Protein backbone atom coordinates (compact mmCIF):
# COMPACT_ATOMS: atom_id res chain seq x y z
CA UNK A 1 0.00 0.00 0.00
CA UNK A 2 1.23 3.49 -0.87
CA UNK A 3 0.23 5.85 1.95
CA UNK A 4 0.62 9.64 1.92
CA UNK A 5 0.48 11.40 5.30
CA UNK A 6 0.20 15.12 6.01
CA UNK A 7 3.68 16.22 7.08
CA UNK A 8 2.80 19.83 7.92
CA UNK A 9 2.64 19.13 11.70
CA UNK A 10 6.38 18.38 11.47
CA UNK A 11 7.28 21.93 10.42
CA UNK A 12 7.44 23.48 13.91
CA UNK A 13 9.03 22.03 17.08
CA UNK A 14 6.97 18.96 17.85
CA UNK A 15 4.01 19.14 20.21
CA UNK A 16 1.02 16.81 20.52
CA UNK A 17 -0.12 16.61 16.89
CA UNK A 18 3.45 16.61 15.62
CA UNK A 19 4.33 13.69 17.89
CA UNK A 20 1.19 11.87 16.75
CA UNK A 21 2.03 12.37 13.08
CA UNK A 22 5.63 11.22 13.38
CA UNK A 23 5.00 8.24 15.66
CA UNK A 24 2.11 7.03 13.52
CA UNK A 25 4.15 7.29 10.30
CA UNK A 26 7.18 5.55 11.87
CA UNK A 27 5.15 2.69 13.26
CA UNK A 28 3.10 2.24 10.10
CA UNK A 29 6.42 1.76 8.31
CA UNK A 30 7.74 -0.60 11.01
CA UNK A 31 4.62 -2.75 11.28
CA UNK A 32 4.22 -3.11 7.51
CA UNK A 33 7.64 -3.10 5.78
CA UNK A 34 5.99 -3.81 2.42
CA UNK A 35 4.10 -0.50 2.54
CA UNK A 36 5.52 2.78 1.28
CA UNK A 37 4.78 5.59 3.76
CA UNK A 38 5.41 9.19 2.66
CA UNK A 39 5.18 12.27 4.85
CA UNK A 40 4.28 15.02 2.39
CA UNK A 41 4.68 18.73 3.13
CA UNK A 42 5.28 22.09 1.41
CA UNK A 43 7.48 23.13 4.33
CA UNK A 44 10.79 21.88 5.69
CA UNK A 45 10.75 19.13 8.33
CA UNK A 46 12.29 19.83 11.73
CA UNK A 47 15.52 17.97 12.36
CA UNK A 48 14.00 15.93 15.20
CA UNK A 49 11.44 14.51 12.78
CA UNK A 50 14.01 13.39 10.20
CA UNK A 51 16.07 11.32 12.65
CA UNK A 52 14.38 8.07 11.63
CA UNK A 53 15.82 4.93 10.07
CA UNK A 54 12.83 3.18 8.49
CA UNK A 55 13.76 2.42 4.87
CA UNK A 56 10.14 2.57 3.70
CA UNK A 57 9.42 5.97 5.31
CA UNK A 58 10.00 8.93 3.00
CA UNK A 59 10.04 12.65 3.82
CA UNK A 60 8.73 14.34 0.68
CA UNK A 61 9.01 18.11 0.67
CA UNK A 62 7.28 19.81 -2.25
CA UNK A 63 7.70 23.57 -1.86
CA UNK A 64 4.60 25.71 -2.32
CA UNK A 65 4.67 29.48 -1.71
CA UNK A 66 1.01 29.68 -0.69
CA UNK A 67 -0.85 27.23 1.55
CA UNK A 68 -4.08 27.69 -0.41
CA UNK A 69 -2.25 26.69 -3.60
CA UNK A 70 -0.77 23.65 -1.81
CA UNK A 71 -4.13 22.22 -0.80
CA UNK A 72 -5.95 23.05 -4.05
CA UNK A 73 -3.31 22.24 -6.66
CA UNK A 74 0.19 21.10 -5.62
CA UNK A 75 -0.82 18.31 -3.24
CA UNK A 76 -3.58 16.78 -5.45
CA UNK A 77 -1.15 16.79 -8.40
CA UNK A 78 1.56 15.10 -6.30
CA UNK A 79 -0.85 12.42 -5.05
CA UNK A 80 -2.06 11.71 -8.58
CA UNK A 81 1.42 11.62 -10.11
CA UNK A 82 2.74 9.18 -7.50
CA UNK A 83 -0.39 7.00 -7.50
CA UNK A 84 -0.97 6.91 -3.77
CA UNK A 85 -3.61 4.50 -2.53
CA UNK A 86 -4.70 6.74 0.33
CA UNK A 87 -4.08 10.12 1.94
CA UNK A 88 -4.23 10.60 5.74
CA UNK A 89 -4.69 14.13 7.06
CA UNK A 90 -3.35 13.85 10.60
CA UNK A 91 -4.45 17.34 11.62
CA UNK A 92 -8.01 17.46 10.15
CA UNK A 93 -6.88 19.19 6.91
CA UNK A 94 -7.10 17.51 3.49
CA UNK A 95 -7.17 18.33 -0.25
CA UNK A 96 -10.70 18.83 -1.58
CA UNK A 97 -9.76 17.36 -4.97
CA UNK A 98 -7.91 14.06 -4.71
CA UNK A 99 -7.94 10.89 -6.81
CA UNK A 100 -7.46 8.63 -3.78
CA UNK A 101 -9.55 7.94 -0.68
CA UNK A 102 -9.00 10.27 2.28
CA UNK A 103 -8.86 9.58 6.03
CA UNK A 104 -8.56 12.43 8.51
CA UNK A 105 -7.83 12.56 12.22
CA UNK A 106 -9.89 15.03 14.24
CA UNK A 107 -8.11 15.34 17.57
CA UNK A 108 -10.76 17.46 19.28
CA UNK A 109 -13.52 20.00 18.70
CA UNK A 110 -12.10 22.79 20.83
CA UNK A 111 -12.86 25.33 18.08
CA UNK A 112 -16.55 24.56 18.69
CA UNK A 113 -16.63 24.19 22.47
CA UNK A 114 -13.88 26.65 23.44
CA UNK A 115 -13.69 29.05 20.50
CA UNK A 116 -12.71 31.91 22.82
CA UNK A 117 -9.40 30.18 23.60
CA UNK A 118 -8.30 30.29 19.94
CA UNK A 119 -7.45 33.06 17.51
CA UNK A 120 -10.52 34.16 15.53
CA UNK A 121 -9.16 33.32 12.07
CA UNK A 122 -8.21 29.82 13.15
CA UNK A 123 -11.70 29.24 14.54
CA UNK A 124 -13.41 30.30 11.30
CA UNK A 125 -11.04 28.34 9.03
CA UNK A 126 -11.08 25.19 11.14
CA UNK A 127 -14.86 25.11 11.50
CA UNK A 128 -15.20 25.32 7.71
CA UNK A 129 -12.71 22.50 7.14
CA UNK A 130 -14.43 20.30 9.74
CA UNK A 131 -17.76 20.75 7.96
CA UNK A 132 -16.16 19.69 4.68
CA UNK A 133 -14.49 16.69 6.33
CA UNK A 134 -17.85 15.57 7.71
CA UNK A 135 -19.25 15.45 4.17
CA UNK A 136 -16.30 14.30 2.06
CA UNK A 137 -13.79 11.98 3.72
CA UNK A 138 -14.02 8.20 3.78
CA UNK A 139 -13.25 7.78 7.49
CA UNK A 140 -12.60 10.00 10.49
CA UNK A 141 -10.24 8.87 13.25
CA UNK A 142 -10.51 10.30 16.77
CA UNK A 143 -8.16 9.63 19.71
CA UNK A 144 -10.93 8.74 22.18
CA UNK A 145 -14.51 7.51 22.26
CA UNK A 146 -15.43 10.83 23.89
CA UNK A 147 -14.33 12.76 20.79
CA UNK A 148 -15.92 10.14 18.52
CA UNK A 149 -19.28 10.87 20.13
CA UNK A 150 -18.72 14.63 19.84
CA UNK A 151 -17.90 14.38 16.12
CA UNK A 152 -21.03 12.27 15.62
CA UNK A 153 -23.24 14.73 17.49
CA UNK A 154 -21.73 18.07 16.45
CA UNK A 155 -20.86 17.34 12.81
CA UNK A 156 -23.69 14.88 12.06
CA UNK A 157 -21.32 12.12 10.97
CA UNK A 158 -22.58 8.54 11.11
CA UNK A 159 -20.85 6.53 13.84
CA UNK A 160 -19.75 3.85 11.36
CA UNK A 161 -17.61 6.49 9.60
CA UNK A 162 -15.74 7.36 12.82
CA UNK A 163 -13.16 5.15 14.53
CA UNK A 164 -11.61 5.86 17.94
CA UNK A 165 -7.93 4.85 18.06
CA UNK A 166 -5.95 5.65 21.23
CA UNK A 167 -2.51 7.20 21.16
CA UNK A 168 0.44 6.32 23.42
CA UNK A 169 3.52 7.66 25.16
CA UNK A 170 6.73 7.43 23.17
CA UNK A 171 9.34 4.82 24.06
CA UNK A 172 11.71 7.56 25.28
CA UNK A 173 9.50 8.14 28.33
CA UNK A 174 10.43 5.82 31.21
CA UNK A 175 11.48 6.27 34.87
CA UNK A 176 14.91 7.89 34.78
CA UNK A 177 16.98 8.33 37.93
CA UNK A 178 20.28 8.66 36.07
CA UNK A 179 22.95 11.27 36.65
CA UNK A 180 22.14 12.66 33.21
CA UNK A 181 18.56 13.31 34.33
CA UNK A 182 19.83 15.04 37.48
CA UNK A 183 22.16 17.20 35.41
CA UNK A 184 19.26 18.13 33.12
CA UNK A 185 17.17 19.27 36.11
CA UNK A 186 20.11 21.22 37.51
CA UNK A 187 20.68 22.87 34.14
CA UNK A 188 17.03 23.95 34.13
CA UNK A 189 17.41 25.17 37.75
CA UNK A 190 14.72 22.84 39.03
CA UNK A 191 15.14 21.67 42.62
CA UNK A 192 14.32 18.42 44.40
CA UNK A 193 10.70 19.30 45.23
CA UNK A 194 8.43 20.43 42.44
CA UNK A 195 4.98 20.15 40.89
CA UNK A 196 5.07 19.82 37.10
CA UNK A 197 2.85 20.77 34.19
CA UNK A 198 3.77 19.99 30.56
CA UNK A 199 2.00 21.39 27.51
CA UNK A 200 1.42 24.53 25.50
CA UNK A 201 0.83 27.60 27.64
CA UNK A 202 -2.63 28.72 26.51
CA UNK A 203 -6.04 29.47 28.10
CA UNK A 204 -7.57 26.04 27.43
CA UNK A 205 -4.91 24.43 29.60
CA UNK A 206 -6.36 26.30 32.61
CA UNK A 207 -3.01 27.19 34.14
CA UNK A 208 -4.39 30.09 36.16
CA UNK A 209 -6.32 27.54 38.23
CA UNK A 210 -3.10 25.58 38.76
CA UNK A 211 -1.13 28.67 39.84
CA UNK A 212 -3.84 29.74 42.29
CA UNK A 213 -4.07 26.23 43.74
CA UNK A 214 -0.28 26.05 44.05
CA UNK A 215 -0.33 29.40 45.85
CA UNK A 216 -2.79 28.00 48.41
CA UNK A 217 -0.80 24.76 48.74
CA UNK A 218 2.43 26.63 49.51
CA UNK A 219 0.60 28.69 52.12
CA UNK A 220 -0.93 25.61 53.81
CA UNK A 221 2.33 23.60 53.81
CA UNK A 222 4.53 26.58 54.63
CA UNK A 223 7.10 25.35 52.09
CA UNK A 224 9.04 28.09 50.31
CA UNK A 225 11.31 25.56 48.59
CA UNK A 226 8.50 23.89 46.59
CA UNK A 227 8.50 24.85 42.91
CA UNK A 228 5.82 24.88 40.21
CA UNK A 229 7.46 24.07 36.88
CA UNK A 230 5.49 24.89 33.74
CA UNK A 231 7.15 23.31 30.71
CA UNK A 232 6.04 24.11 27.18
CA UNK A 233 6.11 26.76 24.52
CA UNK A 234 4.10 29.94 24.90
CA UNK A 235 0.84 29.95 22.98
CA UNK A 236 -1.72 32.72 22.73
CA UNK A 237 -3.91 34.83 25.06
CA UNK A 238 -1.62 34.29 28.05
CA UNK A 239 -1.21 37.84 29.35
CA UNK A 240 -3.57 37.30 32.31
CA UNK A 241 -1.60 34.27 33.47
CA UNK A 242 1.77 36.04 33.45
CA UNK A 243 0.31 39.14 35.09
CA UNK A 244 -1.12 37.03 37.92
CA UNK A 245 2.15 35.14 38.47
CA UNK A 246 4.11 38.40 38.51
CA UNK A 247 1.92 39.77 41.31
CA UNK A 248 1.75 36.56 43.33
CA UNK A 249 3.67 36.01 46.59
CA UNK A 250 4.95 32.72 45.13
CA UNK A 251 6.20 34.31 41.89
CA UNK A 252 9.81 33.24 42.56
CA UNK A 253 8.66 29.62 43.03
CA UNK A 254 7.02 29.44 39.58
CA UNK A 255 9.33 28.55 36.69
CA UNK A 256 8.45 28.69 32.99
CA UNK A 257 10.98 26.60 31.09
CA UNK A 258 9.79 27.11 27.52
CA UNK A 259 9.92 24.27 24.98
CA UNK A 260 12.00 21.27 26.10
CA UNK A 261 13.51 18.21 24.45
CA UNK A 262 12.21 14.72 25.19
CA UNK A 263 15.28 13.99 27.32
CA UNK A 264 14.64 17.10 29.42
CA UNK A 265 10.96 16.24 29.75
CA UNK A 266 11.82 12.69 30.86
CA UNK A 267 14.07 14.11 33.55
CA UNK A 268 11.29 16.36 34.84
CA UNK A 269 8.57 13.72 34.60
CA UNK A 270 10.78 11.27 36.50
CA UNK A 271 11.79 13.73 39.20
CA UNK A 272 8.58 15.59 39.99
CA UNK A 273 6.61 15.05 43.20
CA UNK A 274 3.33 15.52 41.33
CA UNK A 275 2.30 16.03 37.75
CA UNK A 276 -0.82 18.20 37.41
CA UNK A 277 -2.84 18.62 34.22
CA UNK A 278 -5.89 20.84 34.83
CA UNK A 279 -6.98 21.26 31.19
CA UNK A 280 -10.52 22.41 30.49
CA UNK A 281 -10.82 20.28 27.35
CA UNK A 282 -8.71 17.66 25.56
CA UNK A 283 -9.02 15.24 22.70
CA UNK A 284 -6.62 12.78 24.32
CA UNK A 285 -4.02 14.43 26.53
CA UNK A 286 -0.59 12.89 25.93
CA UNK A 287 1.31 14.61 28.80
CA UNK A 288 -0.50 12.73 31.63
CA UNK A 289 0.29 9.44 29.86
CA UNK A 290 3.93 10.45 29.33
CA UNK A 291 4.16 11.41 33.01
CA UNK A 292 2.72 8.05 34.06
CA UNK A 293 5.24 6.25 31.83
CA UNK A 294 8.00 7.98 33.80
CA UNK A 295 6.47 7.05 37.16
CA UNK A 296 5.03 10.45 38.06
CA UNK A 297 1.91 10.50 40.29
CA UNK A 298 -0.73 12.32 38.25
CA UNK A 299 -3.59 14.69 39.05
CA UNK A 300 -5.75 15.52 36.02
CA UNK A 301 -9.06 17.07 35.07
CA UNK A 302 -12.21 15.05 35.44
CA UNK A 303 -13.31 15.46 31.83
CA UNK A 304 -14.46 12.62 29.51
CA UNK A 305 -11.35 12.23 27.34
CA UNK A 306 -8.85 12.41 30.21
CA UNK A 307 -10.91 9.98 32.31
CA UNK A 308 -10.90 7.58 29.36
CA UNK A 309 -7.13 7.82 28.95
CA UNK A 310 -5.91 7.60 32.56
CA UNK A 311 -8.55 5.20 33.92
CA UNK A 312 -8.20 4.74 37.67
CA UNK A 313 -4.45 5.42 37.65
CA UNK A 314 -4.71 9.17 38.39
CA UNK A 315 -6.45 11.42 40.87
CA UNK A 316 -9.17 13.41 39.08
CA UNK A 317 -10.46 16.85 39.99
CA UNK A 318 -13.03 19.27 38.55
CA UNK A 319 -10.90 21.53 36.33
CA UNK A 320 -12.05 24.85 37.82
CA UNK A 321 -12.02 23.78 41.48
CA UNK A 322 -9.07 25.77 42.86
CA UNK A 323 -9.71 24.84 46.49
CA UNK A 324 -10.21 21.15 45.65
CA UNK A 325 -6.96 21.02 43.68
CA UNK A 326 -5.07 22.84 46.44
CA UNK A 327 -6.45 20.45 49.06
CA UNK A 328 -5.53 17.40 46.98
CA UNK A 329 -1.97 18.62 46.34
CA UNK A 330 -1.64 19.51 50.02
CA UNK A 331 -2.59 15.95 51.01
CA UNK A 332 -0.48 14.14 48.40
CA UNK A 333 2.77 16.08 48.56
CA UNK A 334 3.67 15.02 52.16
CA UNK A 335 2.47 11.41 51.60
CA UNK A 336 5.24 9.55 49.79
CA UNK A 337 3.60 6.13 50.21
CA UNK A 338 0.43 7.19 48.42
CA UNK A 339 2.41 8.86 45.65
CA UNK A 340 4.50 5.73 45.21
CA UNK A 341 1.35 3.62 44.85
CA UNK A 342 0.03 6.09 42.26
CA UNK A 343 3.31 5.78 40.39
CA UNK A 344 2.99 1.99 40.13
CA UNK A 345 -0.58 2.21 38.85
CA UNK A 346 0.39 4.89 36.35
CA UNK A 347 3.24 2.86 34.85
CA UNK A 348 0.90 -0.12 34.48
CA UNK A 349 -1.79 1.98 32.78
CA UNK A 350 0.64 3.62 30.35
CA UNK A 351 2.08 0.22 29.37
CA UNK A 352 -1.33 -0.86 28.07
CA UNK A 353 -1.07 1.58 25.15
CA UNK A 354 1.54 1.55 22.39
CA UNK A 355 2.21 3.23 19.06
CA UNK A 356 2.49 -0.24 17.47
CA UNK A 357 -1.12 -0.88 18.42
CA UNK A 358 -2.10 2.60 17.17
CA UNK A 359 -0.46 1.90 13.81
CA UNK A 360 -2.09 -1.53 13.48
CA UNK A 361 -5.54 -0.14 14.22
CA UNK A 362 -4.98 2.77 11.82
CA UNK A 363 -3.86 0.50 8.98
CA UNK A 364 -6.97 -1.61 9.55
CA UNK A 365 -8.98 1.56 8.85
CA UNK A 366 -7.00 2.07 5.63
CA UNK A 367 -7.69 -1.51 4.54
CA UNK A 368 -11.40 -1.08 5.26
CA UNK A 369 -11.49 2.09 3.16
CA UNK A 370 -9.64 0.43 0.26
CA UNK A 371 -12.11 -2.44 0.25
Image (spheres, rainbow, N blue to C red):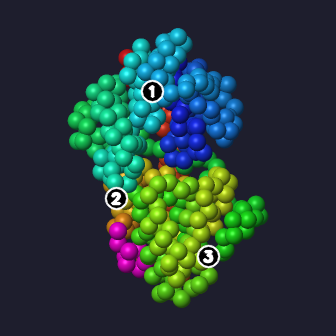
On the image, the x and y values in percent for residue 132 come to: 31, 29
The disc at residue 68 is 1
Q: Crowding at label 2, few (<14), some or many (≥20) Cα neighbours within 10 Å? A: some
Q: Mark 1 or mark 2, which is nearer the start of the sequence?
A: 1
| Drawn side of residue 50 relative to residue 68, left or right | right
Query: Which x, y percent locates residue 370?
Result: 40, 18
- Tell me the CA gap for discs 3 and 1: 49 Å
Instruction: Name the residue located 57 percent from the left edge and 73 percent from the top edge.
Output: 254
Q: Nearer the viewer, mark 2 or mark 1?
A: 1
Q: CA distance from mark 3 to mark 2?
A: 28 Å
Q: Give the dominant element type of the magenta stretch: helix, strand or loop.
A: helix
Q: Residues within 10 Å of mark 3 (few under 14, many from 20)?
A: some
Residue 97 in view (yes/no): yes
The disc at residue 193 is: 3
Instruction: Using the image, tell me which numbered label, if any, was put on residue 303.
Output: 2
Contact (CB < 8 A) between labels 3 and 2? no
Q: Quadrant of the C terminus?
A: top left
Quarter location, residue 10:
top right
Task: From the viewer's side, name the closer residue of 341 and 328.
Answer: 328
Mark nearest the camera among 3 and 1 is 1
The kind of secondary structure element at disc 1 is helix
Which of pointers 3 and 1 lies earlier in the amino acid sequence?
1
* 237 or 105: nearer the viewer: 237
Q: Residue 321 lies in magenta, yes or no?
A: yes
Which of 50 and 346 lies nearest the eye of the viewer? 50
Q: Residue at 44%, 76% (x, y): give it.
A: 213
The magenta segment: 320-327
Q: Earlier in the sequence, mark 3 or mark 2?
A: 3
The location of residue 330, given as percent across then percent down, is 47, 81
Amino acid sequence: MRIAIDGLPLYNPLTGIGHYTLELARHLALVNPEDQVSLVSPRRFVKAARNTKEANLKFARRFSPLMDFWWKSSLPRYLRKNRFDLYHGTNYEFPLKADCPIVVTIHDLSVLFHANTHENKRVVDTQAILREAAKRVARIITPTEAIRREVHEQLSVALDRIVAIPEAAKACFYPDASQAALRARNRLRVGDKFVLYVGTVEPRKNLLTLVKAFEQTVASLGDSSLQLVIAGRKGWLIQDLFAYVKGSPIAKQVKFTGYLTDDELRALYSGCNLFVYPSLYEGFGLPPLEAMSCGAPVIASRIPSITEVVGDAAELIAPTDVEGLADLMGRLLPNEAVRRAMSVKGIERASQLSWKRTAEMTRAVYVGVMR
